[in-house]
Image (cartoon, grey):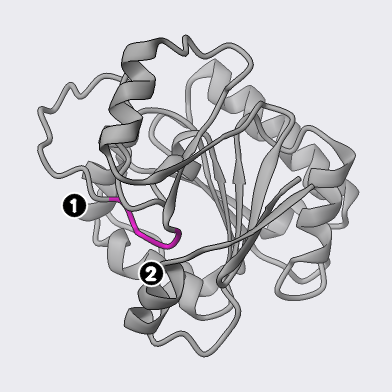
Amino acid sequence: AHAYRNSKISIILSLFHLSHIMNLLLLSGGLITDQIRETVRTHLPKPAIEAKVIFIGTDTTSPGYRNAIQITKQILNQIEIKNKNITVFNLYEESSPRLKNYNVVIMLGGNPHEYMKRIRELGLYEQLNEFVQEDGFYVGASAGAVITGPIYDIVSFSDNENNIEDFCGFGWVDFITVPHLSYRDNTEKQYEYHKKTGCKMLYITDEQAILVQDDFYKII
């Protein structure tokens, strides 16, 4: 594993006035490896048997999403999280959930432009900021990981179908997660764009994840 210090994140955290440890797990492909699964188990804010989890995504009824959610539920069951404590929320529902009722948010993959648009429209932007301030454990997969950085437009990751001009992410970390390194088309043009963002880029494969605890992070 590689460990790093975030050079700017302490400033970001001071803006949030955090009094607790911020816990994020940023994924590329999901809860694939034993190490990633063990990291989830050991970083739950409360005993697994009591932990309440909410999946959040934009297309939770599609076969691909349903299959991914079902597989992840089975993994969560293995670490003693109960099905009765697991909720699935579609970002195209009309009203937003109360995140303070949950201990773990699992933000699924998809189009980060679409995610941020719906998160803002539903008022979830403020709720998610409060969630990570109040001991919530945020697990972001693919797009769910990308949006935690200062910006989320990483080019050729997904289409900006809504012509969004504000690419600001949550800014919880001072780097941008670039998932799916194993099969991403890493062209020179894309690398040049990444350099121009002025942000650090952490490229991870589907078998890797980034664990963030306040101003410390490591690739596992």
Residue 157 shows up from this direction:
no
What secondary structure is found at the residue carrying circle 2? helix
Look at the picture and state if 60 lies above or below 214.
above
Q: Position of residue 217 (x, y in %)?
A: 63, 59
Which one is nearer the viewer's eye here, 213 or 3? 3
What secondary structure is found at the residue carrying circle 1? helix
- Left or right, 73 with respect to 78, comes to left
Q: Is residue 177 magenta?
A: no
Residue at image location 58% in from the left, 11% down from the top: 183
Q: Position of residue 211 (x, y in %)?
A: 67, 55
Q: Could you tell me what secondary structure mostly forms the magenta stretch? A: loop
Look at the picture and state if 7 lies above or below 63.
below
Residue at image location 26% in from the left, 19% down from the top: 159
Look at the picture and state if 19 lies above or below 25.
below
**What residue type is disc 2 on?**
Asn
Which one is nearer the viewer's eye here, 181 or 195? 195
Residue at image location 68% in from the left, 60% down from the top: 85
Q: Quadrant of residue 36?
A: top right
**What residue type is disc 1 on?**
Glu
What's drawn in magenta, residue-wise?
169-173
Residue at image location 51% in from the left, 14% down from the top: 184
- Left or right, 187 with respect to 85, comes to left
On residue 121, the disc is 1
Residue 185 shows up from this direction:
yes
On residue 129, the disc is 2
- Left or right, 97 with respect to 69, comes to left
Q: Position of residue 128 (x, y in %)?
A: 40, 65
